[in-house]
Image: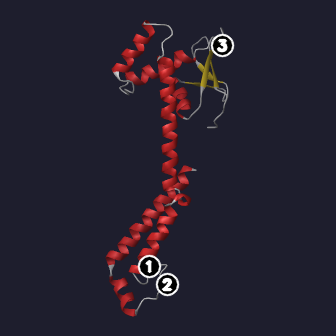
Amino acid sequence: MVESDKPLLIKRYASRRLYNTETSDYVTLEDIAGFIRDGRDVQIIDLKSGDDLTRQYLLQIIAEHESRGENVLPIGVLNDLVRSYTTQANSVVPQFLAASFEMLRDSQSKMMENFSTLTNPMGGFEAMQRQQQAFLSTLVPGWPGSTTAPTPEQQENETNDSDLGEIKKQLAALQEQLSKMDHGKG
């Protein structure tokens, strides 16, 4: 899905069906939740009156997830939200919640950047792999990348050492998995 600065416009017809104006098809609440999970903002407008129904539908999505046992909001938070509606009109709760979620999004973004640096071959994995290769080359003559040629006795030991062969296979499999993970992110 293409991210856009402009919210995805959903129109609600008199029949209460929801219509995606970008794809020209009807959508469900779960579809709308999927758009939001994918990073897209939505705006839901009543076709007849022009009223913005976005807040109402977002609350409905949250209520449906909570009723299915996908409890994200602790009871204490729900109680505090209800209290904030019944106390003063100029409550700081909305600003606090907005700031808290903004901090959470920033933290998640930074964590993902740090994680991608660790798994990105350009960000350190390749250097670590080269260091391991150099280390193994000095310990095991004849290891790929070694500068010294193995003696016939060392070659015989290497071919007879099934444990070393198994380790090499496992290392190759791990490298392939890491490579697939790195390519899957893009």
Residue type for callout 3: Leu
Question: Residue 3, percent across and down?
Answer: 63, 36
The residue lying toward the viewer, choosing from 129 and 174, is 129
Q: Secondary structure at mark 3?
A: loop
Q: Are marks 3 and 1 in contact (CB under 8 Å)?
A: no
Q: Which numbered tag is attached to residue 137? A: 1
Q: Secondary structure at mark 1?
A: helix
**Of circles 3 and 1, which is in front?**
1
- Residue at (46%, 70%) from the top-left corner? 131
Question: If you read the primary sequence from the N terminus, does the residue marked by circle 2 or circle 1 appear first?
Answer: 1
Local crowd size for mark 3, using a 10 Å CA cut-off: few (<14), some (14–19), many (≥20):
some
Q: Secondary structure at mark 2?
A: loop
Q: Which numbered tag is attached to residue 47? A: 3
- Residue at (40%, 70%) from the top-left corner? 169
Q: Which numbered tag is attached to residue 147? A: 2
Q: Is residue 16 left or right of residue 74?
A: right
